[in-house]
Amino acid sequence: MAASAQAAVPPPAKERMIGIQIGAVSFVDEGVEPVLDILQSRADVNTLFIAAFTYGRGIAGRQVPGQPLPDHGKQQYDTATFRGGSYTAVHPEYYGDTPLRDFRAPDLGDFDVFAKVLPASRKRGMKNIAWFEDVFRPDVTGAEPVQEKDLHGRNANTLCLNNPGYRNFLLGLVEDYARSWELDGIMWGSERQGAFANAIGSRAFGRSEDPGRITCFCEFCRKKAAQRGIAVERAAEGFLALETFVRSSRAGNRPADGYFEQLWRLMLRYPELLAWENLWHDSLRDTYQAIYQKVKSIKPSMGVGWHIWHNNSFSPIYRAEQDLERIAPYSDFLKVVMYHNVAGERMVSYIDSVSEVQYGDVPKQELLEFHYRVLGYGKEKSYPELAAAGFSSDYVYREARRARAALQNTRTQLWPGIDIDIPTAPGHSKCTPQGTRDAVLAAFRAEADGVILSRKYSEMKLANLSGAGEALKSL
């Protein structure tokens, strides 16, 4: 297969999953039926990914404050009212073994997004998937006992996947969804990674703020590590040494043998560093499997899938950890994020971060070209141009082909996440109808089974949403 978005021929026509991520506030602001009319007429949407639980603005709430408001919905920000939590009813009988029990979102009063939307969408033949994410606030009632511990024993805002209290919350949440509502599936996303990758800043969205705040080193993670034969105290010693190295590197203090060699010296001296990183991702996969088994034990026909974080497109370390073939047995579908427009800005932030630590001896343009090669990308823009230009649709094609190849011997559906108006900084690339159209076409040329228009309807411009519809008409 040629490695170009323009060279491939679309697969034969079949029923394609056309999904969109949407939060409760859009139905409150614009009305359920009018919103569904827009989604079907402009983009042929046949599946709603309804933001049912989150404390983050990435999938819920109106437009992010400071970004231009779209051409629909209330023309005001919800800064004063947004809090997050559950946007549907919480049934207490499913949350007896977790301290997280009081989490109904107060933002929209007693509006219940499932109760209001599911009957209307089902009448139109649309499917409904509960979409929730691993994002919390530090002031959530009951969160403190299940928070992660950083390298120095301090509580983090994130919750620990190995803590029974948090694991029981996630299992209670999906049981609530499976038993209480006529849903077609659930999708969960966790945009996090392990302590080693966080310490060295191997991530987009800006470097890690403090290499001493990496997680998790709580009693449950330590116990699990010991059971796996990891020397816990050696691991802690190694991460303290890594913290010192990262702080010194970011201050511009070049090691005598260079940055890359010094990092490898630490890894060889403390193999526990990578063992601890793998522990975190094994815990994530364990959580996937537990959620999958819980849902299937209640409703076997209900689809279960995962949102794969955009860091997958920038960090070779994170990509190596996202072994799609390995997680396919407990994945009915995968939303692999392929946000082409915002990818330029995010790749630049990733290069800026890693150029201060392990790649401190490599000029940024050379470092970017290296990543283009190892990640399998074609000719994208140079470092000075990239944030303003974004990535091309060829990036979507190549990423979708790569994911398709990883899943070729599985039954798992591939549903790329397509960027529509995800906010970028002033002067950086902005979405266009043509860009949206090209990205959707590229995904289907790569034999994707569907697409998920992302991040949320409340930040999308209608013309750009229509670009997805134009792509589908041309197919």
Image: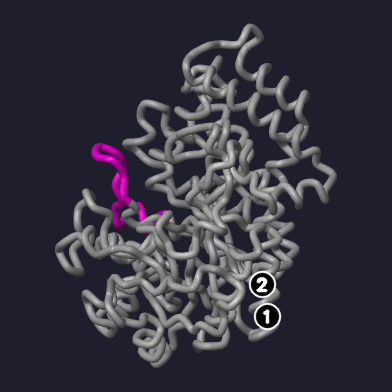
Numbered disc total:
2
- Start and end of the magenta stretch? 423-438
Which residue lies under the disc numbered 1?
Answer: 296
Q: Which residue is drawn at 59% across and 43% down?
A: 215
Q: Position of residue 255 (x, y in %)?
A: 61, 11
Rate crowding at label 2 as few (under 14), some (14 to 19) or many (20 or more) other CA atoms within 10 Å.
Answer: many
Q: Nearer the viewer, residue 346 or 466?
A: 346
Q: Give the residue at mark 2.
A: 292
Q: Is residue 377 left or right of residue 102?
A: right
User: Is residue 8 covered in magenta?
Assistant: no
Residue 396 placement (x, y as % from top left): 49, 51
In the rendered image, which quarter is residue 230 located in?
Answer: top right
**Which of the pair 415/305 is nearer the observer?**
305
* Residue 6 visible in the picture: no
Quadrant housing residue 420: bottom left
Identify the residue at horizontal 45%, vertical 77% (top origin): 47
Q: What residue is drawn where x is 65% and y is 50%?
A: 322
> Are the residues at dot 1 and dot 2 in contact (C-beta closer than 8 Å)?
yes
In depth, the one of 474 and 417 nearer the eye is 417
Which structural element holds mark 2? helix
